[in-house]
Image (cartoon, rainbow, N blue to C red):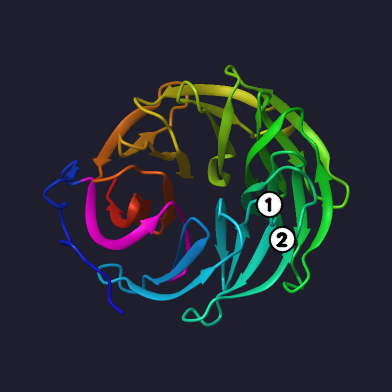
Amino acid sequence: MALQVCGLVGAPEDVHAQPGTVEHVATVAGGAVVVHAAGALAVTADGNTLKVLDLSTPESPVTRGTLTLTDRIWDLVVDHDRAYVANGFVGFVVVDLADPDAPTVRGSYEVVSQGQTVSIALADNVVLTTNNQTGLNAFDVSDPTSPRLLTSWLTGGYSRDVAGMGTLGLVADQPDGLHVVDLSDPSNPLEASVHFAEGETTQLVVSSPATATAFIVDGATSTVEIVDLTDPTSAALAGTYTAPGRVMHVAAEGSTLFLAQAGQGLSIVDVSTPSAPHLTASYDTPGAVVGIALLDDLILVADTEALLVLRHRP
């Protein structure tokens, strides 16, 4: 079934884009809070239901299948024909996307605790999750029907978010900041370093492997700290950027940072000079931007009531 598509260039009448920088490509109607993509497939989630989209032709997205899980979908990552899902109290769930019209649960792992699995990422050949009570967990998914827990790493506070960068696991910890964990041997993790954040409510982390940089976000002040990981054993603050509104999600590609800022829309920030980051583009959306995924030159924006497909032209 083809989905609602708006004009290819420019935005709907109630949306304002910065001309020549961000172009509206399509709008997919329906709730979208979480989004991730790989290849031609994107997966969105709203509540406990995920939806598979075919973006082979970005101007005409097609919805394929849906799947309803037991608990809220907090986060997900797509890798080839699988989606790995942070599924709250259920834990970690593997979804098979081999038939996009009929996504199915292949396996799961329940992290027994009073906390919820709230974030998920890939690092080298392992899947990483964070549980806000048990910290960082690393899984072997070579057998997707039976994910195997390799190790757990308890941070100093509440583990809010996770990102992978090669063999490193990066954990946003409240109130510590950024924990950098060496997972060269996933069964024997070693803490490479800790970058103690200037604020006390670090909630988000994203990595840019190409520039050996991590970005952590203070949820209270919307301050993004730019952390140099050229030497992972000595994480160093390289600069900061204070966003004009609350940062709900963050993505990075090279020296470009993409911020989901709820009612403020999408902000694109140049961090090529970390000591002097600057806004290069913004895009105001009809709803509240709560999630972002990058796919080639496309930006997929989860806007609560719809998924916007945008094209970024630096």
User: Compared to 122, does 147 lie above or below?
Assistant: below
- Identify the residue at image location x=60%, y=57%: 71
- Image quarter where the C terminus lies is top left
Q: Nearer the viewer, residue 164 or 229?
A: 164
Locate residue 13 relative to residue 150 in the image: left or right.
left
Q: CA distance from mark 1 to mark 2?
A: 25 Å
Q: Nearer the viewer, residue 240 or 273?
A: 240
Q: In the image as oriented, which residue stretches furthest toward the right?
A: 188
The span shown in magenta is 21-41
x and y, in percent, of residue 138 in the image: 76, 52
Q: Which residue is mark 1?
A: 89
Q: Which residue is mark 2?
A: 125
Q: Is the stretch drawn in magenta largely helix, strand or loop? A: strand
The quadrant holding residue 257 is top left
Q: Is residue 142 visible?
A: yes
For badge 1, the amino acid type reads Phe
- Identify the residue at image location x=24%, y=40%: 284
User: Compared to 160, does 147 lie above or below?
Assistant: below
